[in-house]
Image (cartoon, rainbow, N blue to C red):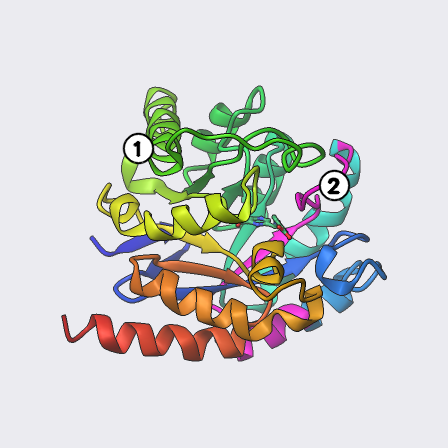
Amino acid sequence: MNFLQCGSRRLDLGRPVVMGILNVTPDSFSDGGRGGRFLGPDAALAHARRLWAEGARIIDVGAESTRPGAAPVSVQEELERMLPVVERMAAELDVVISIDTSTPEVMAGAAALGAGLINDVRALRRPGALAAAAATGLPVCLMHMQGEPDTMQEQPRYADIGAEVEAFLLARVAACEMAGLPAERIVLDPGFGFGKTLAHNLDLMASLPRLAELGFPLLVGVSRKSMLGAILGGAPVDQRLHAGVAAAAIAALHGAKIIRTHDVKATCDAVAVAAALLERT
Ligand code: PT1
């Protein structure tokens, strides 16, 4: 039972795996806002090959930035950025293709071209998303977010973040089951940095073992995020590698099964240390 059937590809989650990030947005936060880095399918494919060679077993393709302050993109633009890249990846790489999208049309289109996992930071709350995701037959990652990306960091508030995130995620699991998307196809993600202060993110990291006990594979993404910059006393995005690797090891040790990162090689090594420890207990 320790695997996820991702379309034609089977993902073994007996030990934690690394998901590499492939942005096909012009404004990805981690390239310092220079933009345009992985826009076209050729450049995207070259980067995907590198993520795979470094050890990523899932590649998460995103055409809409969801970092704090990001503006929404049109459905048309998202489709035009995402679909050609998914099509080429499915033909040329033996990797699980995850699509980072909240858009029903993108879910349907990318699934038809060979995507293996739907990663939705809005946990299928957009109109039509539950039905579209269920119809693909693919597994989905349901993530917790308070608010929407453009304003979520303005006033995040929780009484008990661990309990609230758990209640939200379980409510989304119930909505999935009602829509014909069974629990065996569900991955959960507490959503680090999505409507959370540093203290909230740290409390959430400490609650990972409890979330893992719900019995769903947990996905964690902390790579290069501002929580790491804050811990380091204001480190800019290009100075957060080591903190991100440390946080990935801690998340894996606390039960995360999928670690989402820009820095695949270093994160694979960190996860291997956590996995070695986990196998002794
Ligand atoms: C994530 C995630 C994601 N993160 C999943 N998908 C992003 N499942 C995109 C900051 O504080 O954690 N899980 N898709 C990127 N989002 C952010 C959020 C980027 C916060 C940066 C920050 O700097």
Q: Is residue 30 above or below residue 102?
A: below
**Residue 74 relative to residue 242: left or right:** right
* Residue 163, percent from left and from top: 33, 33
Q: Is residue 64 magenta?
A: yes
* Residue in the image at 30% along x and 59% along y: 254
Closest to the observer: 152 or 79?
A: 152
* Residue in the image at 52% along x and 28% along y: 132
The disc at residue 70 is 2
Q: Is residue 49 magenta?
A: yes
* Residue 213, percent from left and from top: 22, 46
Between the C-alphas of marks 2 and 1, the distance is 32 Å
Closest to the observer: 51 or 279?
A: 279
* Residue 49, percent from left and from top: 61, 74
Query: What residue range appears in magenta?
Result: 47-74
Q: Is residue 73 above or below residue 180?
A: below
The disc at residue 182 is 1
Closest to the observer: 87 or 68?
A: 68
Whether residue 7 is visible: no
Nearest to the eye among marks 2 and 1: give it: 2
Secondary structure beneath label 2: loop
Kind of residue at badge 1: Pro
Q: Is residue 266 above or below residue 88?
A: below
Mark 2: give few (<14), some (14-19) or many (20+) Cα within 10 Å: some
* Residue in the image at 59% along x and 30% along y: 104
Secondary structure beneath label 1: loop
Kind of residue at badge 2: Ala
